[in-house]
Image (cartoon, rainbow, N blue to C red):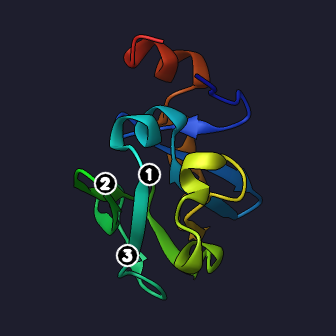
């Protein structure tokens, strides 16, 4: 499994890539493998401020539906529109074209409390 070291991770299997006071959020390679073939993504928080660990949407796979949890306090700026017509991008490229939302960070210091790639890999037994 792949866990890029430049990202931060949550125990709920989300990743975050910080770029200044904005960031991209998606689900990890481990999470997409566990879910299986992803068929639909519903982001119900566009334009809203979402608190850390609150649900910002759902991901639907062939065998289950799973909540998506915000890694930090943030405002949801954008949904990855490519996922409307091609949700399997999450399975194919979870850390690239498969990102789910772009956010504006409310408190940059919250990033430090997230897991490193090594800590996340250890937590999933990889």
Residue under numbered circle 3: 42
Closer to the camera: disc 2 or disc 3?
Answer: 3
Residue under numbered circle 2: 53
- Residue 104: image location, x then y, percent: 60, 71
- Residue 112: image location, x then y, percent: 56, 36
Could you tell me how far apart the alpha carbons at marks 1 and 3 are, in whole angstroms? 17 Å
Secondary structure under the numbered disc 2 in the rendered image: loop
Q: Is residue 96 above or below residue 30?
A: below
Could you tell me how far apart the alpha carbons at marks 2 and 3 are, in whole angstroms? 17 Å
Q: Which mark identifies residue 83? A: none
The crowd level at tag 2 (other Cα within 10 Å; few <14, some 14-19, many 20+) is some
- Residue 40: image location, x then y, percent: 40, 70
Q: Residue furthest right?
A: 20
| Residue positioned 35% across, 43% down in the render | 35
Q: In the rendered view, does 125 fall on the left or right side of 7?
A: left
Q: Earlier in the sequence, mark 1 or mark 3?
A: 3
Residue under numbered circle 1: 71
Q: Is residue 82 above or below residue 90?
A: below
Q: In the rendered view, does 17 fall on the left or right side of 126?
A: right
- Residue 64: image location, x then y, percent: 22, 53
Q: Are marks 1 and 3 in contact (CB under 8 Å)?
A: no
Determine which quarter of the picture holds residue 101.
Answer: bottom right
Q: Is residue 86 above or below residue 72?
A: below
Determine which quarter of the picture holds residue 105.
Answer: bottom right
| Residue positioned 70% across, 64% down in the render | 21
Secondary structure under the numbered disc 1 in the rendered image: loop
In depth, the one of 24 and 111 nearer the eye is 24
Q: Residue furthest bottom?
A: 47
Q: Can residue 23 be seen from the camera position used here?
A: yes
């Amino acid at each position: 499994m792949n866990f890029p070291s430049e990202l931060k991770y949550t125990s709920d299997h989300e990743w975050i890539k910080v770029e200044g006071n904005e960031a991209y959020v998606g689900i990890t390679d481990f999470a997409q493998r566990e879910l299986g073939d992803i068929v639909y993504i519903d982001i119900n928080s566009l334009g809203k401020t979402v608190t850390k660990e609150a649900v910002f949407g759902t991901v639907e796979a062939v065998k289950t539906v799973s909540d998506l949890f915000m890694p930090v306090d943030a405002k949801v700026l954008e949904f990855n529109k490519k996922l409307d017509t091609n949700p399997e991008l999450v399975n194919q490229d979870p850390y690239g074209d498969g990102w789910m939302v772009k956010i504006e960070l409310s408190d940059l210091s919250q990033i430090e409390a997230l897991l490193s790639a090594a800590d996340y890999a250890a937590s999933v037994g990889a």
